[in-house]
Image (tube, rainbow, N blue to C red):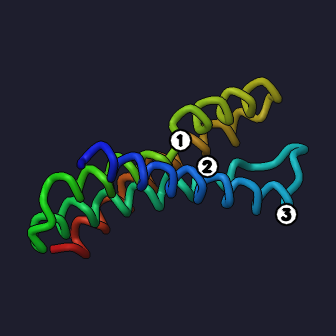
Amino acid sequence: MTAVLVGIFGVAGGLLRFSIDTWFAHRTGTRRHWPWATLLVNVIGSLIIGLSMGISGRLGLGEEWHAAIATGLAGGLTTFSSWTTATIRLVSEGRYPAAALNVAANLIAGLSAAAAGIALAA
């Protein structure tokens, strides 16, 4: 049952990421853009996992629901590979400050969102 839940939630997370990527692509274009969609999905995913850590145990939802939310939904939503390739693209364009900001923003905002999720769920 856990694998089915993870799969269903993973599809939902992947579709949500695709929707966010598409929305940003239509509004910002692809030329010299900042990877806003990747930052947004990574921060939202960190918040979701933080919330799941506290809510699953407190509500007695069980490990299968935590796996569905954290691994499925947040895992399908977030994207380490897009973050790293966006950073490499910024470097290859000579946009070193933007690349460094991309690394720092994802790391700091992601950690902050995870901590906020845990705090909110407490």
Give the alpha-carbon distance from disc 2 to disc 3, as whole Å. Answer: 14 Å
Q: Which residue is mark 3?
A: 27
Nearest to N terminus: mark 1 or mark 2: 2
Dot 1 lies on which element?
A: loop
SS at badge 2:
helix
The earlier-in-sequence mark between 1 and 3 is 3
User: Which amino acid does the dot numbered 3 rest on?
Assistant: Arg
Is disc 3 placed on a helix, strand or loop? helix
Viewer-nearest residue: 16 or 34: 16
Is disc 3 surrounded by few (<14), some (14 to 19) or many (20+) residues within 10 Å?
Answer: few
**Residue 21's spot in the image, x, y percent?**
70, 53
Horizontal side, residue 98 vs residue 64: left or right: right
Instruction: Give amino acid for label 2.
Output: Thr
Question: Which label was assigned to residue 79?
Answer: 1
Residue displayed at 71% across by 33% down:
96
- In which quadrant is the C terminus drawn? bottom left
* Residue ID at (20%, 59%): 53
**Residue 97, quarter of picture:** top right
Instruction: Give the residue drawn at x 68%, y 27%.
Output: 88
Nearest to the observer: residue 10 or residue 38? 10
Give coordinates of residue 61: x percent, y percent.
Answer: 15, 66
Q: Residue at x 78, y 24 (%)?
A: 92
Q: Earlier in the sequence, mark 2 or mark 3?
A: 3
Q: Amino acid at mark 1?
A: Thr
Q: Which residue is mark 2?
A: 38
Question: Would you say 118 lies left or right of 57 here?
Answer: right
